[in-house]
Structures are given as C-alpha cells and as structure tokens.
Image (cartoon, rainbow, N blue to C red):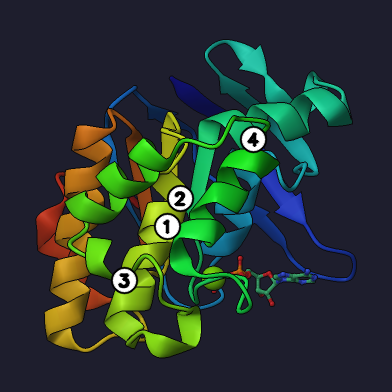
C-alpha cells in the first residue's frame, strides 16, 4: 500500500504544487490524469523515491520512504519499482535480450534467461530477442520498455505518458499490455497521461488540476 499525505512540491523559483491525499492499495490499477505541466511526472517521481517532496509524507507499506538512507532507497527502487518512460531507455549497442539481462544485473539479481523469454513471449516479441533497438518499430520498442519494467517483477509498475507518441492502434495495445502485465506480475499500476483516448480502460483515477 502506498499513501501520500499532505504532499506538496516547489521547484526552486517555481510555484508550489499541492497534491491531494492518495491511497493506492496493492494490485490497484490507477490512471493519473492531468494536463501538460500539471505535475504528473513530478508526482510519479515523488511516488517512486526519485524526488523528495518539499513537504508531506510518502509511505510504502508503512515505511516513510524519504526516511530511508540513499542506499536503502536505491535498493528499494531497484527491487520494487518498474518504470516505463515516455520514450524507451534502452542501450543501443545491446540486443533486446541483453538489455533485459542488464536490468536484472542492475537490480543485483542473477541472469535469468527463462524469465527474459517468459516476459518477451507474454508481450509477443520473443522473436526479437536477438535484434537491436534500432531494428524495431516504435510499437515494438514500447513493448520492450514494458518488458524492461516488469522483468524483475516489481510490486509497483509506473508508466509516464506511455501512449503519447503512439497512434490509436498502438496506444490501445500498450494499455492492454500494461493492464495485462500488472495482472500477470501482481503489480500495482499507475499510468500518467493527458491522453483522452486512455480514460475508459481504468476504474480508478486521480486527477491533477
Ligand atoms: P507534467 O508531467 O504533468 O507535464 P511536470 O511534473 O513535468 O508536469 O511539471 C510540473 C511543473 O513543474 C511545470 O510547471 C514544470 O515546468 C515544473 N518543473 C518540472 N520539472 C522541473 C524542474 N526540474 N525544475 C523546475 N521546474 C520544474
Ligand atoms: Mg510529464
């Protein structure tokens, strides 16, 4: 369970963004809605331990994450949080399989090629495992980003505007995959978007104004 209490953030020289309290239960699937500039990325960074807010408390399973040491927080993030960025963050000189093995190794986990195959198969791109990122289409790359985010079975899966650069068909497919992958991996899902096409797929929404 994640809870956000009285959290607000002010970048140096910027306006204060106040976030209403939020409780996310394990296994929930949430849409985080807000126009561009409303604070979605800021809030995702606060939720995942990347950005300490100027005020307020963020608890994950009853631990206030910003009371952890930097090392504890890094370890916590590597083990528990999978992030899908707006554009895929992959190493161009490594093939798809090796990119996923790298994600295992960065989290301090042993190489597990069975897991790599399992994830790529569930995303329908097992035939691309020896391909390099520049040999894949944008829709396929987005699937690899999802694979990279779920490879270590994170408890929390976060996607920041995963559909904004995709056409309708790929946007729908990516959302279905996120919902499916959060189900398969029993991960809590939070998807930030300003994409109006996305809204109907989720029962829980948290709106920024
Ligand atoms: P969104 O993801 O909804 O588009 P952001 O969280 O990126 O919104 O930004 C919220 C506000 O904070 C915007 O006004 C943005 O300009 C500002 N902001 C974001 N990141 C920084 C930063 N690193 N330094 C200063 N201001 C920032
Ligand atoms: Mg953003």
Secondary structure beneath dot 4 equals: helix
Q: How many neighbours does mark 3 have within 10 angstroms: few (below 14), some (14-19), or many (20 or more)?
A: some
Side (left or right) of 40 relative to 128: right
Q: Earlier in the sequence, mark 4 or mark 1?
A: 4
Task: Tell me which label, 3 or 4, sits earlier in the chain.
Answer: 4
Question: In what quadrant of the picture does the C terminus appear?
Answer: bottom left
Q: Nearer the observer, disc 1 or disc 2?
A: 2
Q: Nearer the viewer, mark 2 or mark 4?
A: 2
**Of marks 3 and 1, which one's residue comes earlier in the chain?**
3
Instruction: Say few, some or many: other residues with alpha carbon within 10 Å of mark 4 (under 14 / 14 to 19 / 20 or more).
Output: some
Residue 2 shown left or right of residue 26 in the figure: right
- Name the front one of labels 3 and 1: 3
Chain-order first, disc 2 or disc 3:
3
Q: CA distance from mark 4 to mark 1?
A: 15 Å
* Relative image position of residue 138 (x, y in whole percent): 34, 85
Q: Are marks 3 and 1 in contact (CB under 8 Å)?
A: no
Residue at (21% x, 53% y) in the render? 121
Crowding near the residue tagged with mark 1, few <14, some 14–19, many ≥20 C-alpha atoms within 10 Å = many
Q: CA distance from mark 3 to mark 4?
A: 28 Å
Residue 48 in sight in this render:
no
Q: Is residue 171 left or right of residue 61?
A: left
Q: Which mark is residue 128?
A: 3
Q: Position of residue 63 (x, y in %)?
A: 64, 13
To which residue does mark 2 refer? Answer: 149
CA gap, disc 3 and disc 1: 22 Å
Gap between marks 1 and 2, in whole Å?
9 Å
Give the residue pinned by disc 1.
159
* Numbered badge on residue 77: 4
Check the image and report above or below for 147 versus 198. Answer: above
Earlier-in-chain disc, 1 versus 2: 2
């Amino acid at each position: 369970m994640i809870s956000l209490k009285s959290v607000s953030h002010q970048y140096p020289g910027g306006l204060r963004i106040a976030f209403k309290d939020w409780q996310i239960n394990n296994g929930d699937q949430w849409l985080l809605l807000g126009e561009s500039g409303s604070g979605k990325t800021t809030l995702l960074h606060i939720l995942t331990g990347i950005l300490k807010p100027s005020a307020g408390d963020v608890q994950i399973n009853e631990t206030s994450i910003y009371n952890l040491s930097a090392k504890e927080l890094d370890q916590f993030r590597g083990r528990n949080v999978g992030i899908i960025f707006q554009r895929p963050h992959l190493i161009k000189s490594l093939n798809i399989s090796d990119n996923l093995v790298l994600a295992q190794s960065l989290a301090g986990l042993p190489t597990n090629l069975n897991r790599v195959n399992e994830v790529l198969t569930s995303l329908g791109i097992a035939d691309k495992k020896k391909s390099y990122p520049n040999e894949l289409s944008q829709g396929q790359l987005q699937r690899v980003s999802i694979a990279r985010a779920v490879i270590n079975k994170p408890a929390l899966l976060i996607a920041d505007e995963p559909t904004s650069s995709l056409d309708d068909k790929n946007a729908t497919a990516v959302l279905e995959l996120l919902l499916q992958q959060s189900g398969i991996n029993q991960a809590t899902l939070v998807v930030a978007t300003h994409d109006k096409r996305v809204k109907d797929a989720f029962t829980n929404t948290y709106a920024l104004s």
